Image: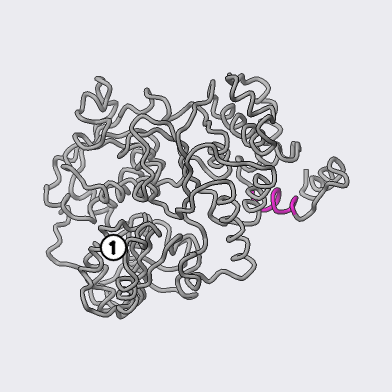
Amino acid sequence: MSRTQLRRKAKRRRGGRFNPKQYNDLVISYGSISVRFVRELMFDLPITPVAARYRSFRSTMSLDLDREEQHLLSGAEGDGTALAMRIVACAARVLQAENLTPIHAAHIDGCLYHGDSGVLFAERLVALGARVRVPTTLNVGAIDLLHGDRDRLEPAAKDMARRLMNAYVAMGAKPTWTCAPYQAGHRPRRGEDVAWGESNAVAFCNSVLGARTNRYGDFLDICAAITGRAPRTGLHLPENRVATVLVDATGIPQPYWNQDIAYPVLGTWLGHVVGERVAAIEGIGHPSEDQLKALGAAAASSGAVGLFHVIGTTPEAPSLEVAFGNRPPSEVIRLDPSTLENVRLTLSSVRLEAGDAVNAVAVGSPHLSKAELLLLDRLLGNRQCAIPLYACTGRHVVNEFSAEDLRSFVDRGVILVADTCIVVTPILPRSSGVVVTNSGKFAHYTPSNTGYDVVFANFRDCIESAVTGSLQLTPSFPHAV
């Protein structure tokens, strides 16, 4: 059936309630399966063959809802909550979950503007009276609300982005606007079930905190927050959290793991090789929280890693035996130095020599912690940046600094970016060039999202490159080879 035929059918079924702009926004602009399910629920339209097949499948799948869940589904707590419960139940059937699990908290990724559909969906929930039932934080938006001049969004898009952010706040979510909520006070306890979006946050939540979440995408994340329920499947189940792959890193020289650059490299390799499986890593010592953050972010960007264990460090892996549930690994992978060096090279999209000109430096994906921003301040010292140095962080970190301290960053040429980052909204100048970064996530997304090439370097070399305006590489850096 063509789009024109679908539109006519929708108009016939909706009659005078048919809104052509809303139909176009919700039905035409998005094509992911999850959104098709949402629009089917919102308009009761079997719009695509996928939705039609799902409707048939839905009738054959049983989902056991408890009394509270049936109460929410009935509309007794409002139409917005009922809609959210229909979507959560819908997703649970797709995932073949037998029931739902109560959640203690949520982190919402759907507040980032990708088009009008998401805005209209969130505003409809608001209009229907939906409110979050659990503590809920918000991921980055498309606007830096602290520094209004950071982005290059067109006025109409900026207005829609602001409407989207406002809608989520109106539903009771906390306006944290960070991809690192775990460093903004949102730290669920080990064993708690939560519903988090944002891939790096999911990896950190599962791996470092020991809480339990799957990767919840747009729409489903807010629906879980509104209902306080999520499908009981995947990493919510203890049996799915046991490691199956052993990564033996004991063959890598220990000084390598003292460097910040090691963890995005390891994470990138882990995502490519392990994918969705759960790995336990042995031989990397006891990484800091920021190093584990970098590892998880790179692994979630290059693959689908939602949980990893570091033997002797992360909460569910005090020993090999515990990490693997007293079973032998299904696969053992021994890391060698040349493998990591090859991965490091792939994180740069262009080959440059030390001294070659570069256009900008970007750090802070995931958002810089207070410790990382203080390190930037110390490495920069009293020197002036020759090229823009974009430092992306959360407002929870910005608020830790005095106005005088923040002015000092600006005076030295540092461009502080809060609430968002350079790869999710247009911040870099409208041109092309080369960005130096220490972030595995920036290295992954910058070329496709911004048109800029990237050179991957350690944190110190990033700062030195910003000061000189040319690529600086430390010759004595202990690479894996």
The quarter of the picture where residue 369 lies is bottom left
Estimate how packed mark 1 is, as few (under 14), some (14 to 19) or many (20 or more) residues with alpha carbons within 10 Å: many
Q: In which quarter of the image is residue 417?
A: bottom left
Residue beneath the point at 49% across and 53% down = 175
Q: Is mark 1 on a helix, strand or loop?
A: helix
**Screen quadrant of the C terminus:** bottom left
Using the image, determine if residue 139 lies above or below residue 187: below
Place of residue 291 in the rendered image (x, y in percent of width and height, measured from the top left): 25, 50
Magenta: main secondary structure: helix
> Mark 1 sits on what residue?
373
Decide if residue 355 is on the left or right side of residue 440: left
Between 226 and 296, the one nearer to me in the picture: 226
Residue at 63% of width from left, 23% of height from top? 70
Q: What stretch is highlighted in magenta?
A: 22-30
Residue 479 placement, left or right of 42? left
Front residue of 1 and 381: 381
313 with respect to 364 (left or right): left
Image coords of residue 52 (percent x, y): 71, 33
Q: In which quarter of the image is residue 306?
A: top left
Q: Is residue 80 left or right of residue 288?
A: right
Residue 279: where, in percent of width, then height? 30, 34
Q: Residue at x 31, y 67 (%)?
A: 351
Residue type (three-letter) at the residue carrying disc 1: Leu
Please say if 428 is above or below 95.
below
Q: Is residue 175 magenta?
A: no
* Residue 27 falls inside the magenta stretch: yes
Task: Pick the quarter of the image with the N terminus.
Answer: top right
| Depicted 409 relative to depicted 18: above or below | below
